[in-house]
Image (cartoon, grey):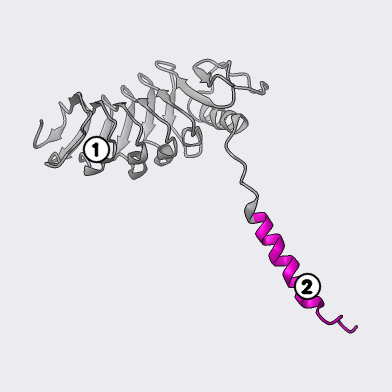
């Protein structure tokens, strides 16, 4: 069959136009449904006993969960002393990208701090003390530029105090005591808003 002159060019034009149009369509933004799925995955991994109703369309009424005023996103997750145990998998807490406050203190969480926690760019308050978290603080952690209070004390965290902490310019309180940190404290540690710093009971060679 003879091809109509110019048909190939028209087809190519339509194909390119379709690609261009698709590039203009925004990707689906994280929403409450995504937050709900992340919370359920978190529960399945470390807290299957939590009384969260998986049939509920919204997680806003679940124990320890607080949403924003419009009910559009989860902004707080507070489960202190809730008998959580085990390692927190990727794709759970890291998908709660609107979180302001995360408190999981006094549980039995183990393994490393989730590497994708840095995706929670709105975090101001992070309390993970009194668990069994181990390993080094992940690189992505230092992307939490709005963080004001951080408590990782009473864990098994190792490695040094990274100069990357200088990226957390709004940090006012930093608790890292009772871990397995070692090495020398960076001489150029510069946190202009820091008011409280506790690094006691580690293996650091210099304490300020």
Q: Secondary structure at mark 1?
A: strand
User: Residue at horizontal 36%, vertical 41%?
Assistant: 143
On the rendered structure, is 196 left or right of 30? left
User: Residue at horizontal 31%, vertical 27%?
Assistant: 148
On the rendered structure, is 44 left or right of 203? right
Label 2 and label 1: CA atoms lie apart by 61 Å
Q: Earlier in the sequence, mark 2 or mark 1?
A: 2
Front in this rendered view, residue 61 or 18: 18
Residue 165 in percent (x, y) is at 25, 39
On the rendered structure, is 91 left or right of 21? left
Which residue has dot 1 on it? 158
Q: Is residue 8 magenta?
A: yes
Question: Would you place residue 112 above or below residue 27 in this image?
Answer: above
| Part of the protein shown in magenta | 1-22
Residue 8 in percent (x, y) is at 78, 77
User: Residue at horizontal 33%, vertical 42%?
Assistant: 138
- The part of the image, by quadrant, that contains residue 169 is top left
Which residue has dot 2 on it? 10
Front in this rendered view, residue 37 or 86: 37
Question: Would you place residue 166 above or below residue 7 in this image?
Answer: above
Q: Is residue 158 magenta?
A: no
Q: Secondary structure at mark 2?
A: helix
Front in this rendered view, residue 37 or 98: 98
Residue 44 in percent (x, y) is at 54, 28
Q: Quadrant of the N terminus?
A: bottom right
């Amino acid at each position: 069959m003879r091809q109509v002159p110019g048909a190939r060019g028209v087809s190519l034009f339509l194909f390119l136009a379709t690609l261009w149009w698709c590039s203009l369509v925004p990707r689906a933004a994280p929403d409450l449904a995504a937050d709900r799925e992340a919370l359920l995955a978190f529960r399945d991994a470390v807290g299957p006993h939590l009384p969260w109703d998986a049939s509920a369309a919204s997680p806003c009424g679940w124990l320890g969960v607080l949403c924003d005023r419009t009910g559009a996103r989860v902004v707080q997750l507070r489960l202190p002393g809730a008998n959580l145990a085990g390692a927190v998998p990727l794709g759970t807490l890291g998908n709660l990208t609107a979180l302001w406050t995360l408190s999981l203190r006094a549980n039995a969480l183990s393994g490393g701090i989730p590497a994708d926690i840095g995706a929670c760019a709105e975090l101001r308050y992070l309390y993970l003390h009194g668990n069994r978290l181990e390993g080094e603080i992940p690189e992505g952690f230092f992307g939490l530029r709005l963080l004001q209070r951080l408590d990782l004390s009473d864990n098994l965290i190792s490695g040094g105090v990274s100069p990357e902490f200088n990226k957390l310019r709004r940090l006012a309180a930093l608790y890292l005591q009772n871990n397995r940190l070692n090495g020398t404290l960076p001489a150029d540690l510069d946190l202009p808003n820091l008011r409280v710093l506790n690094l006691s009971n580690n293996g650091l060679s210099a304490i300020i």
